[in-house]
Image: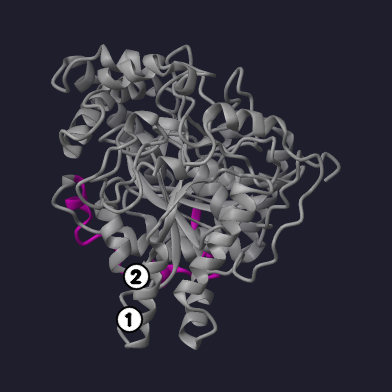
Amino acid sequence: MTDEKTNLSETGRWSRRRFLQAGLSGSAAAAAFAARPTRPLDTPSLEIAELGIDELQAGLDSGRFTARGLVEQYLDRVERLDRRGPALRAVIETNPDSLAEADALDRERKAGALRGPLHGVPLLIKDNIDTADGMATTAGSLALIGARPPRDAFLVQRLRRAGAVLLGKTNLSEWANIRSPRSTSGWSGRGGLTLNPYALDRNTSGSSSGSAAAVAAGLCAAAVGTETDGSIVSPASLNGIVGLKPTVGLISRAGVIPISATQDTAGPMARTVRDAAILLGALAGVDPEDPATEESRGRAAADYTKTLDPAGLRGARIGVVRRFFGLHRGVDALMEQALAVLKARGAVLVDPAEIETWGRFDEAETTVFLFELKAGLKAYLARLGPASPVHSLAEIIAFNERRAAEEMPYFGQETFLKAEAKGPLTEKEYLDAWKLCRRMSRREGIDAVMEAHRLDALVAPTDGPAWVTDLVLGDHFLISSSTAAAVAGYPSITVPAGAVFGLPVGISFFGRAWSEPALLRLAYAFEQATHHRRPPRFLPTADLRA
């Protein structure tokens, strides 16, 4: 049900990650990409660009802002930066009802009736999350143009209940990057190519590409992404923001276009840890339509900001996963600086603290995805009803073949074909792979190393710096530390840790199931000690003198 920043490599290993309003088509996007500007762009100095949720709420309370005024300012930024200017193409469509929603929330505030912590705050959500309104839900694919979800996804209901204004939907790696092993992250047939606001020729990673770029560029207060393996944390890292992939079951997947029933989850993407914590509290909740959420009963917090403490590193035992060091000199330097900060702020480092089973469940993860993708899409498309343009993975494959010039100009659908060849979830191949993944990632993986060293969290570089986008060969991942937590269904959070040649790099804290409060506390303390995040400058290419 979620996004995936993952790609199937040729060895089978997962290395990770209203139509008229949709933006550029794939071919037009490529032309615009080639004609990108050759010098830095002047960007609008709008006061909301870097404001956090608390600051926006303070302005709304004081009368300095109105919800309508905020929506108008963010829509102006979308027009200036996403449609024109650097043309980021992070927003696949804007919500035609957003101003009316804002007006209603302003009236409620004036009457003294506040819905919750997000009352009047404009957010963006990924285009694989259902809304029963004037917006489409397509996973970036032309195959779902015209499909209308029967109701809001449960997490969207939660956001509306908390008072959020849905500003629009974000572009993504099409079908959450599950279609082909040679995909280019951030590209979809419907939305074109999302550009990285730090260097426009660099990749955003994915699959929550548009959510990450939009938050970084100040096109919204915060956004919702989805992840199956790396699709929140990797684009968050490459776009210099905070991304939290929660425990599977903390946030309902009902009404989210699926990949994997065992690994999919939505999660918050924000400029600060505090904003991510606020958004997480609004998203979490038990949903009868998603049985996995029953496990969160009694474990979810109503307010995750209560765990935030600038001194939260003191006495924490943190294990250093060294296998992700030694792959890039610049990243290594940033990570050593980060470890020094953790230690100086009172953390006890266990270095190294390796997950001994890492790499031993990659093929099994792939097998699980192939089976669950076929079954999950069939169930999701049935939810749409007979009005859906497609009703199965086989019909999606046939659509792509008919519309290959638009849907497959750069890469194919090899993974879709492999998934279509799989049988039901009762097959021994699937059940054996699922059991192996659980055992290797949980009991013999993360749980084992954390128990052995009495750890509060593990830490590793999230990813390398953004690579130059390559529509011919596809993605060039260098570092990817997301897999163990993803396969286990455990939480992870990435926070900016600095930059290499002006390209952001994140550090990930991850741990056992339901440890979001601890991870948020550690990430917040690191963020407050370092303040590494810098707003993007929309440069045409990376500044190699930085």
Q: Is residue 200 visible?
A: yes
Query: Is residue 78 highlighted in magenta?
Result: no
Residue at 50% across / 87% down in the picture? Answer: 62
- Highlighted range, magenta: 292-317
User: Mark 2 sits on what residue?
Assistant: 163
Position of 36 with respect to 58 (left or right) is right
Q: Position of residue 519 (x, y in %)?
A: 44, 56
Q: Crowdedness of circle 1 by 10 Å Cα count: few (<14), some, many (20+)?
A: some
Comparing 345 with 531, the one in front is 531
Disc sitting over residue 71 in the figure = none
Q: Is residue 458 visible?
A: no
Residue at 40% across / 14% down in the picture? Answer: 414
Residue at 32% across / 88% down in the picture? Answer: 111
- Mark 2 in CB contact with mark 1 (< 8 angstroms): yes
Q: Crowdedness of circle 2 by 10 Å Cα count: few (<14), some, many (20+)?
A: many
User: Mark 1 sits on what residue?
Assistant: 108
Q: Position of residue 126 (x, y in %)?
A: 41, 46
Three-letter residue code for mark 2 = Gly
Three-letter residue code for mark 1 = Glu
In what element is the residue under mark 2? Answer: loop
